[in-house]
């Protein structure tokens, strides 16, 4: 079975390198939601669509330089996404701010939505208190949905180190949130 998967990967890579539009559409459909979520978190919703397009454009133009590795094609593309986000931050001088919904009133939202709104605000605030490395691990693993192996290849680490870092980051996020509730 493992050999068949390798054959499928090799066939897909040949088609991607041949710029087969059907394969690129499949790749786009596979990665778009994850890339968009990654960029919304990294650079905000207003620039996310352009950043996804820039990432996939760079991937298309650089596909001949891609060398298969443990992260696979999705991990390689998320590596490009990290560079696109960094380039965006270098181009802009404004600090990135996550969209903050206005205050909810009892007349505006049902009680459940108000509670959910407060929980999201608490989570966003706690996430911002994490150090940059912890945020990046959680962005790649949880928001972008990369596997530990893919994240490891993107970050130049071992998969076990990524899992440990994710565990520590989640524990720290929990601690920050518990402190906020106290």
Image (spheres, rainbow, N blue to C red):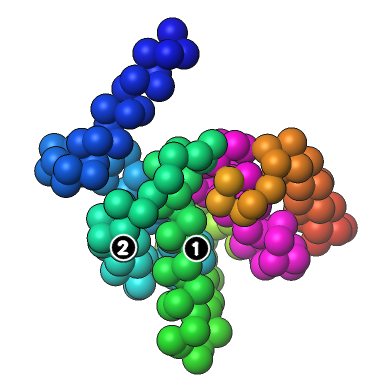
- Residue 163 within the segment the image draws in magenta: no
Extreme residue toward the left, this view? 21
Residue 21: where, in percent of width, then height? Answer: 12, 43
Which region is colored magenta?
123-152
Q: Quadrant of the N terminus?
A: top left
2 or 1: tag closer to the N-terminus: 2
Q: Residues within 10 Å of mark 1 (few under 14, many from 20)?
A: some
Query: Which residue is the extreme one toward the bottom?
Result: 93
Tag of residue 58: 2
Residue 147 lies, in percent from the top left, at: 56, 36
| Residue shown at 47% from the left, 45% from the top | 75
Q: Quadrant of residue 45?
A: bottom left
For the point 69% across and 66% down, which residue is it?
132
Q: Is residue 3 above or below residue 146?
A: above
Q: What element does badge 2 sit on? A: helix
- The one nearer the camera, 70 or 172, is 70
Q: Secondary structure at mark 1?
A: helix
Measuring from the top left, give residue 79's x and y in whole percent.
48, 56
The reply, left or right, for residue 160 in relation to residue 29 is: right
Q: Which residue is mark 1?
A: 82
């Amino acid at each position: 079975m493992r050999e068949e998967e390798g054959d499928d990967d090799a066939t897909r890579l040949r088609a991607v390198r041949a710029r087969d539009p059907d394969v690129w559409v499949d790749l786009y459909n596979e990665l778009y939601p994850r890339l968009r979520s990654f960029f919304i978190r990294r650079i905000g919703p207003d620039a996310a669509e352009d950043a996804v397009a820039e990432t996939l454009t760079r991937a298309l133009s650089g596909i001949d330089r891609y060398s298969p590795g443990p992260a696979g094609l999705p991990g390689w593309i998320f590596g490009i996404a990290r560079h696109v986000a960094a380039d965006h931050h270098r181009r802009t001088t404004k600090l990135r701010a996550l969209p903050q919904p206005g205050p909810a009133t009892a007349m505006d939202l049902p009680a459940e939505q108000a509670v959910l709104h407060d929980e999201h605000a608490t989570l966003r605030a706690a996430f911002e208190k994490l150090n940059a490395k912890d945020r990046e691990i959680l962005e790649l693993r949880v928001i972008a949905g990369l596997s530990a192996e893919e994240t490891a290849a993107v970050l130049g680490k071992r998969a076990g180190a990524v899992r440990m870092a994710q565990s520590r980051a989640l524990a720290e996020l929990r601690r920050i949130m518990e402190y906020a509730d106290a």
